[in-house]
Image: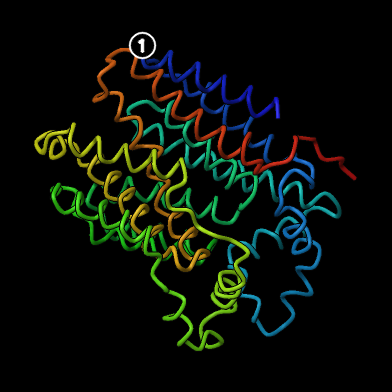
Amino acid sequence: MLIYILFFILIAILAIQYQFTPFQNNYLLFSLVLLLAFLAGFQDMNVSKDYFNYQYVFDNVYYITNHNYLYLITFEPGFIAIVFFFRTLFASNYGVAIMFFYAFCSLLIKVFTIKKLSINPYLSLLFYFSYFFLFHEMTQIRIGLASAFFLISLVSFLKGNKLAFIGWIIVATCFHYSAIFYLFLLIFNTKNLNKSLYLGILIASLIFGVLKLPILNVFGNIDVSDISSKLDNYIQISENGSIAVNVFNSLNILNILSCFYLLFAVTKEEFLEDKRLILFFKCNILAIFLLSFLAGAPAFSMRFNQLFSIAQIFLFPYLIRYLPAKKFNVFILVLMAGIFFYVIQIYGGLLNPYKIITLK
């Protein structure tokens, strides 16, 4: 547990320093990428709840892919290609090589994008570490790399290059099929924001969170065998009640309150002057809405929420400009990131105590 806390403190110090005295240091950012990649890549198999499942695939990839390509229903071609590549290079310890490769590539792309798009890159990295790093690089590596390609696609999207954006999303989909839904961003207009509309969506999200619409009744009328075994698995998990969605959990409430605050604290003119803020805000509102609207189908609700909520790492730092504490706003944001970190790791226990894997 201590090593996660030390990383949080280190990044928090850098975020505060950057806010008071902005600095450019690519070597420092790359060093953080490398350290975090080592943290994820060399974790023991008992640290993450998903590691054993991944190792089973790594060990049995030749058997899995020997069934008339039906494996592509469950595992994406990009993932299988990487596993094949490292199985060819290494006779043993290929699992460690794959985990490190995924973490390093994902972090490198994300930090590159953060540097280009964030108003405080270290604060964005702090929010990323406090939540998404623990889920992505340490646990769900496929969606971790897919989300990295999504983030870099935002650079093209904000430049108005929709073709390049679509290309990046296709690449992301090769590493996690759910990434195809990132194409929903094509409906977003970064030149305008209807504050009344998004206020209504936030209020509707609260209502849907209470109602928990029976979405599974809709999916229950679909012959899932004709679509995907993964869709079938999501429905089975939801029906069995093995996971549940609490829309009014502390982190989602904090997120909703932040969005309400930005809606009222930021003028329409200020929104229109910053298309990045509009895009990140709309992505985050979509994440909140999907969590509530799909709450009756928990597996779907959580997956779609995680897809789009990664925009939080860019959106939350904007609160520095609009919170009332002025130069001390950065401390409020660090505390906010600390709440995320506490709930996910310390209170929630997402990861077991850290231990370095023993190489064969």
Q: Which residue is mark 1?
A: 20
Secondary element at tag 1: helix
Q: Nearer the viewer, residue 147 or 249?
A: 249
Q: Residue 48, percent across and down?
A: 71, 47
The furthest residue to the front? 210
**Outermost residue, left side:** 269
| Number of numbered discs | 1
Residue at 57% across, 40% down: 344
Q: Which residue is more in the foreground, 288 or 160?
A: 288
The quarter of the image holding the N terminus is top right
The quarter of the displayed image where residue 258 is located: top left
Rendered location of residue 109, percent (x, y): 49, 42
Task: Give the left or right position of residue 170, taking residue 70 as reference.
Answer: left
Q: Amino acid at mark 1?
A: Phe
Measuring from the top left, give residue 75's x and y in whole percent: 62, 69
Asked if 169 appears above or below 15 in the picture, the reply is: below
